[in-house]
Amino acid sequence: MSSFEQRNAHFDRLFATRNLFWLGQNTNHLPMHPAVRKALIESIEAEEFHAYAPPGGFTALAHAIVEDLGLPQDTTTAVVTDGAVAALATACRAYCEPQTNFVTTDPGWKWPMQFARQAGAQVREVPIYDAAVGYRLTPEKLNESIDQKTRIIYLVDPNNPLGICYTRDEIIAFCNSARKVGACLLHDCTYRDFADDHVLAARFYPEGAITIYSFSKWLGLAGLRIGAVVAGRTMIERLAAYSTATLGSSVVAQRAAQAGLAIKKQWMADVQRIQRRNQAAIKKQVDAIPGLLIPVYPSQGNFVIIECAALGLQPEALAAVFANRGIMIRQGSYHTPRFGSRFVKVSTAVPTEWIDAFCQQLPEAIEAARGLNEIPELF
Ligand SMILES: Cc1ncc(COP(=O)(O)O)c(C=O)c1O
C-alpha cells in the first residue's frame, strides 16, 4: 500500500469503529441543535442540492459570517469554502511563490506549510514550545524571522495544539510587523469561540489581514466541510481567483451553517460550559498522576495537551493503547516533529462520558503503554 493509501485506510478504520470516542481531532461531537437539524432536513427534502451554490456562498451566509466576526460589512467580504483548510490553501496559492517565504510557529498546524511549499515558498517555523516565552510567539521573535520576502505570517490563534490565545497588544504588534514588510497576516481563527477574549487582526490591519473561519469546531459540522476566507475587498478579489470552489460549496452545509449562526449565542454557552468542564476533569486526573503535566490551562481551544515525557512514555504508545480501547487521542508528532515526543492532545467539545472514560482509563493505559513493544503507524 502506498503511504497515502495507508493514511486513508487508517482514517477509514477510525470511521468504521463503532462508538469510537473522537478525542483526537478537536471536532465537536455534542448533539446538534434542533434548528441545525431542521435546516439540514429541510434542505435535503427540498432537494436543493441538485443546483450549484453561488461561487462565494449564499450572500445571507457570507454576511452572517462577517457579522459574527464583528467586522464592517461595507469593507469586508467572506467567501465560503470547503472548510477552513480550503480557505488556507486558497490563501497560500494566492500569495506564495518561489523566492518568497512563509513564517509560522512550531507547533502550529501543518497543512498550510505544505500548501506554501507546494506554491514554492520557503517555510520558516519559529519554535514556541517553551515555558520561558509562555508558549507563545513574541513580537521580537517574529521580527527576527520576517523580511521583505515574507508573503504570509500564519498565526494559529488560539494555537492548536498549545491552547494559548494572543492578547490585543500582541495582535497589534504582529499587525505592525506584517505591515512593515508588506506581508499578509493569515489569522487562523478556527478555535476563536473557545477563547475567553479573542482579538481579530483584521481590526488593526484591514488592508493585509486574512481571517480564516471554520464551522467544524464550534458548530460541529466537520464532516459537512464548510468554512470561509474573510478579507477586505481588494484582497478578496485576488483570493477568489484562486479558490477551488468555483462551483460553490455544499448547499446543504451552508443551510446548516446559517441556522447555526442564528442560534450561536445560546449554543456556544452550552458548548463552552461542557468543554471547560471536560478540561477541568482532565486536569484533575492529570494532577493526580506524578510525571504528567498540562502546560497550558485552561486551554483557549477545545483541547488540552498533556505532557508525558517525564514518565519516559512515548506519546505514540499512549495513543495506540487508547486506540485499542476505542478512544482516539492525538500524538504530538502530528503537529510537530521537533516537540512531538513530549505530549498527547485530547479534545474536549465532546460528551462528558467520553472524557470521564478517558480519565478513568488513563492510569491503566499508562502502564499498558509502558509495556507496548510494537507501535502501529499513526497519522
Ligand atoms: C488550526 C486549524 N485550522 C484549520 C483546521 C481545519 O478546519 P476545517 O475543518 O474547517 O477545514 C483545523 C482542524 O483541525 C485546525 O486545527
Image: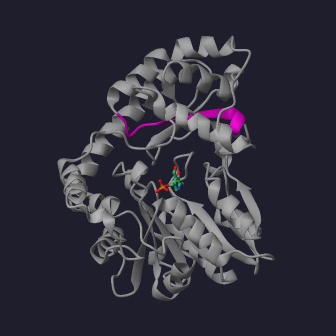
Q: Quadrant of residue 59?
A: bottom left
Q: How many marks?
A: 0
Q: Quadrant of residue 313?
A: top right
Query: Foreground residue, 217 or 313?
Result: 217
**Residue at x 74% of width, y 43% of height:** 337
Q: Position of residue 294 (x, y in %)?
A: 55, 33
Q: Quadrant of residue 198?
A: bottom left
Q: Position of residue 182 (x, y in %)?
A: 66, 83
Residue 353 appears in the rendering: yes
Residue 173 appears in the rendering: no
Residue furthest out toward the front: 50
Query: Foreground residue, 190 or 294?
Result: 190
Quarter in which the C terminus is drawn: top right
**Residue at x 38% of width, y 32% of height:** 278
In this rendering, would 193 be left or right of 368? left
Q: Which residues are magenta?
A: 340-350
Quarter in which the N terminus is drawn: top right
Q: Position of residue 262 (x, y in %)?
A: 21, 62
Please say if 343 is above or below 101.
Answer: above
Q: Position of residue 54 (x, y in %)?
A: 37, 76
Q: How was the colour assigned to the protein in this rendering?
A: one colour
In this rendering, would 358 be left or right of 308? left
**Residue at x 64% of width, y 45% of height:** 335
In this rendering, would 3 be left or right of 37? right
In the image, is residue 240 part of the stretch drawn in magenta?
Answer: no
Please say if 269 is above or below 173.
Answer: above
Residue furthest out toward the right: 99
